[in-house]
Amino acid sequence: MIVCVAVVGHNNNPLYLQSFIDDDNTLKFHYIVHCSLDVIEEKVSNSKRAGVNLNETFLGLLYPTEDYKVYGYMSNTKIKFVLVTTDQDSRDADVRNFFRRLHAAYVDAASNPFHVPGKKITSAVFAERVGNIVKSFGAPAPA
Amino acid sequence: MVEDMEELRTPPVPLVALVGCPEYHGAISLYLHREQPPLNTLALPDFAKLPILGGKDKKPIDARMPPPLGILKHDWLTKHRTRMPAVLAVLLDRDHVYGDPTQWLQVCTHLDNVKLVLRGRNVKLVVAIVQPTSQGEINEERLAALRKRAEVDAKCCIVFITHEPSELRRSLARLGSIMGELATIFYREEGRRVKLRVEKKSYSSLELSVRYNFKIAVYAEFRRDWVAALKFYETAYSLLQEVISSTSMELQPVQRVVEMKAVAEQLHFKISNLLLHGGKETEAVRWFREHASWYKQMMGPFEGAFLHWAWVSRQFQVFGELLQNRLATASQTPTPNNAMRGQPAISERELQPAYYHHVSAVYMVKRRLAFQASLVAFETFEESNAVDVLAGPPEEVGPPVYVGQAPRLLKRGTDNHSQSPTETEYMRHSILLEKTFKHSVIAIALFKKAHELYQLMEAGRTCYLLLSDMGREYFAAKDYVTAMRILNSVVGIYREEGWVVLLGSALTYLRECARRLGLAKEFAVYGFELLALPLSAPISHGYVSGSEVDTFGNLERTQIHQELVEFLLGARNIPSQEGESAMTLSSALPVHLEIDLLSPLRTVLSVCVAFHSQSVRLGKVTRLTLAILTNLPSPVVFDEVEILFNQSSCNFSTLKNNFVEDDHEDLGSGSMSSLELQPRKWKRVSIDVIAEESGKLECLAVVAHFGPHATIRCQVESMGSREEIPFWKSEPGIDASPLADPMLASLGQKVIQVEEPEALVDISLEAPSPGLVGEAFPVCITISSAGHSIQAGDLEVYFAPSGKSEGGELSTSPTTESEVSPAELLVRHSGDNPQSKDNFELFAGLVEVPEISTGDSWSTVIYVRWLEPKAIILMATFVYHASEEGASKYQYRLHKSKEFDCVETLAIEHHYMPPFRRDALLLGNLDADTTGGQVPAATLALKESTILVVTLKNKSPVPVRLFKIEVTEEDRSRCVVHKSGAVLKEEESIEPSNDFTEGAAVGIVVAPEEIFTQLFWVYPLVPSNSLSVGTISVLWQRAMSSDSNANASEATIPNDKKAVDSVNNQVPLATIMVESPPLVITLDCPPHAVLGEAFTMTTKVQNMTNTLQEVSFSVVDTAGFIFSGAHSDTVSILPRGTHFLSYNLVPLASGIQQLPRVKINSAWYSASFQPSPLSTQIFVFPYPRFDPARYSSIDEAFGSLAIS
């Protein structure tokens, strides 16, 4: 089950962070997402050093916490997407698909003329769309 | 538990025992220990100690047996490591074995004893006959008897020779190898025995399966069969899981849960250790992950939760340490191995020990929280006089029989069941034991360790997380100072990267720390920053440390805000740390907050200001508009607002002054001393400022007062150059501009230039037309009062080269021009120094101006003398104090500049000419074209007069009066010059200086562009190649005609000769060549002729040399005359002689007529001469009306001719 989805801007500032469990303790997700930026940086610099997968946006499993697994994805514009899930082993394809759809949703939200680039995403439509993507996570992709 | 772990940490080493001949035990033990694989030795000095090897009698396994009381025997492993040898070596003295029957009997008794002790057990026996000397015979029969007695085969009965080192070494090797071999056999057989038991399933309890598998694994380890050991440990581990799954952990007593997990821990420890030593890090991590997640849920009863978290924390800590040790020794760092399909991937983080230390620390915190909860319940229900029986004296409390169980109470009975403590006793003991445990210290140590390791990995944000956790733990441990220090180091990154929620959490703790430490200022700072955070959703305090600090929602914000404001107003005390007095603001404890442009508190209060104009006159009113913004969640009211300037006289305070403009109309004009700010809404107010000093007036800061003891000083910034607050840029901000006026909002500055007051005075710089180089050019400076009566003032006059050169082109090299000043400023001498050559002296630059009353004026004249024709800008700066009432305190300043052009006045040229109709043959000129009759300036004839023609041209646009033109000879003995002509004769006698005194206008006025010519006779006395003739000096003056008075500029200058002084221009004459001519030819002819009347024309050829000269001549006929004389001839002229060629001519036509031209050729010099046509013309008067004798001059004659 997905418990948290976050979009982080290219200055490592949070643009969107939503938890999907009924727990008043969203702070820990902030910490988890913030720390995951370390791993994203490591992965990006490592892959650069290795000279492979330069165009790979999906970063795979970033790190596990005691209760969660954290996956990452980085767009070409250095927008990071972070997924926190309780599933101990998710299929890579599912996660990739999830990120692809999240990325598309972000692109649409960022294309909104009323959205100021670099500012938090406050669009309700985006939130709703993310909610739908989260709900359909793991389900077979719509034809 | 920890010491058990130590025992498990190292692989077990086979144990052997020695008995008899104790003198060799040391050497043998040492040798066996160094053996590969090593053997531990249990040395028994004599046979009496044998019984300690004895084990208990083994009961056969029965399926009907009840399940055992525990899973693993507590001391089983210890027993096998230290007391149960695999092999027993009996050392017998050779003398005893082969000695007399008594000794033999003794040996037999010993062997019987040994066999008795080892009966029923599989311990191998080795008999070694120690042979200290080389002497002595071997009794084969006795040896066979010995083998039979000891029931060992020949291989196990060895001779141990000690008398020689090499033999001893060989013997030791033999003993070592046989003992190692037997030990392996022993452990294999033991393992097989237990395995057989497992396979036969002759029992019903799973617990025994766990135990047996554990034993098989340990035996495998004894014989270094790691693969088998791992396999059986894993089996034991999974069997234990089955045991646990079969019951519900929640319903089990705490003791049972603790035991299960202790066994699981031990098994897992062995598995991890074996995997890591085998280099299978990813496998170990995978195992650990399974282990941790499976057992994490096995919390057991609630009251024992802290024991569970202690256990989980220890799992992570121990695994972290194992991994760290492994990585320290591993040659290469492991990489996540994703190749194994179907297995969850291992991330890089999981291969880092730091991760495990961190999680361990987190569980340590959980342990503390769980314990605190348990402690409350315990203290509520616990009777006060209960005794912790488990903490009794050592003789009453025995060690547990099984791994993970509680100590036994020995007084309770004899069997295990009755000796184990009750659940209540156990919990009481655990809680009391836990009470002494320093949770925070351990947790902080773990956080620190993880922090260090993460720092090495350069995982910055994770480090900040660890610091946050550490800070919270310090807070929990009531070390508020350290907590504040650590959390303060964390907030920067969250501010920078815009993680509001994380910053809010840290600030909540910081504020709480400040409150408990009684730090009023910090309390206010953190409170304000927390309140001003752009929080869109409520945040909770912290996920680790529990409920020490309240959550932070909108309601809490309002409360905190109110509390903070009331505290700052002095209306509320803030309860501080327990036992200390509450925090109150007073004059002894004021709070002054400083907000600069980089302060995070700018979200609390930011002010930008704009002056309405860019500059203002001193003493005049200017308007300043302030826009104030706060992000605090509730409206805030300041009692007093001060606005500070760099000129303190301008400072503004709402207590003393009123705002002149306010964007809120509802504020009455009376109660203006307080200022209310609405959240996230610009407040705009304007004030009027009167600057008292000239220069820069800058608005520095706004100081807002809360009550009598609290102030916030906020630096202001210019409206125009306003920068966004560097924090929370990604949060939705306020788009509104601080000012409605877009012009002011985009250009307004916090600095205004205060200019000096307007000077009511005029300065005029007046001068005639362009200046002339060399003259003292008068510039009249007039200061006239136009409203101010001037008390005293200073006039400063200076000049600068103009940017334009004379020709009007921009100068290309200003640097070189500036090196040489093109002009100088002069003033006229005071009258008492008339002897001075020059009437002027250099101007000092400053003139004191006397009092000038309103309407009056004062003027002075400054002279400019140009050295080169270049335009200059003359500048005059007048500084004065006015004597008017009110205006006297200011200094007024007025500046005026004017450009003046300058031109060259006279162009002076000169050239030499030979006298009329007298030519000298100059050999230097032979090559030159002499037909023009003009002798080049370069060569003059020696001791012949030559004419010097000096031409002056007035290039300036003004007429110039010439006083004197003269040539000053360089050396009268070499060359003599005298003036010729009648024109200047009369003025030659008049000195120009005398002119001035008489005031008569003398000299010659040369109009612009007019040319004036003056002739001189030059008479060289010595031949020379380079003769300096002298210098032409021209004395002149600007002509001051009365006609030019119409010129306005001249009207201001008194038309006085003194105003303009004469100028002496001096031009050196070019050097000349002087040579003596060999021939001089002179044409002698009357000045005019009359038609029909004969006259004589003589050409005189003078031989100037001392030799005979041959000269040929020829005459060119002309139509105007008939003449008599030789047409052509060659004559010889005697040295110093003169030859005359005379012709009688009769004019045939009147008017200008060309005379016949005589061409002379010198054979010696091969030079010919023909006079120029111009010099051989003559005017022929018509006959008879003209009588030339009646006239004295030719002009008169011409005049009469014209009349007639």
Image (cartoon, grey):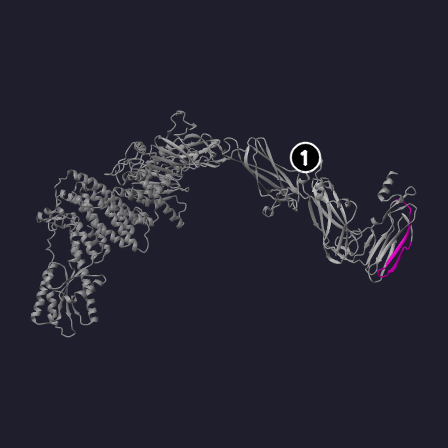
User: As drawn, which residue projects farthest toward the front?
Assistant: B832
Location of residue B788 by image quarter: top right
Q: Could you tell whether B443 is left or right of A123 in the image?
A: left
Q: Position of residue B71 (x, y in %)?
A: 16, 49
Q: Chain of mark 1?
A: B
- Between B1114 and B383, the one lying in front of the other is B1114
| Residue closest to the eye, B1156 or A82 | B1156
Picture coordinates of residue B778 (x, y %)? 64, 40
Q: Position of residue B712 (x, y in %)?
A: 36, 35
Disc 1 residue crowd, few under 14, some 14–19, many 20+, Cα 10 Å: few
Task: Evaluate whether residue B291 shows in this view.
Answer: no
**B179 lies above or below B828:** below
Residue B691, horizontal then vertical, whole percent = 47, 33
Q: Which span is picked out in magenta? A: B1125-1150
Residue B148 shown left or right of residue B494 in the figure = left
Quadrant containing the C terminus of chain B is: top right
Residue under numbered circle 1: B1047
Tell which of B981 and B691 is nearer to you.
Answer: B981
Total numbered circles? 1
| Image quadrant in which you'd find residue B246 | top left
Whether the magenta-drawn stretch holds residue B152 is answered as no
Q: Please check the rendered image and state whether residue B1145 is part of the magenta-colored stretch, yes or no.
A: yes
Label the magenta part by its dominant secondary structure: strand
Indicate the amino acid at tag 1.
Asn
Q: Is residue B231 visible?
A: yes
Q: Provide the secondary structure element on which disc 1 rests.
A: loop
Residue B487 as seen in the image, left or right of residue B683: left
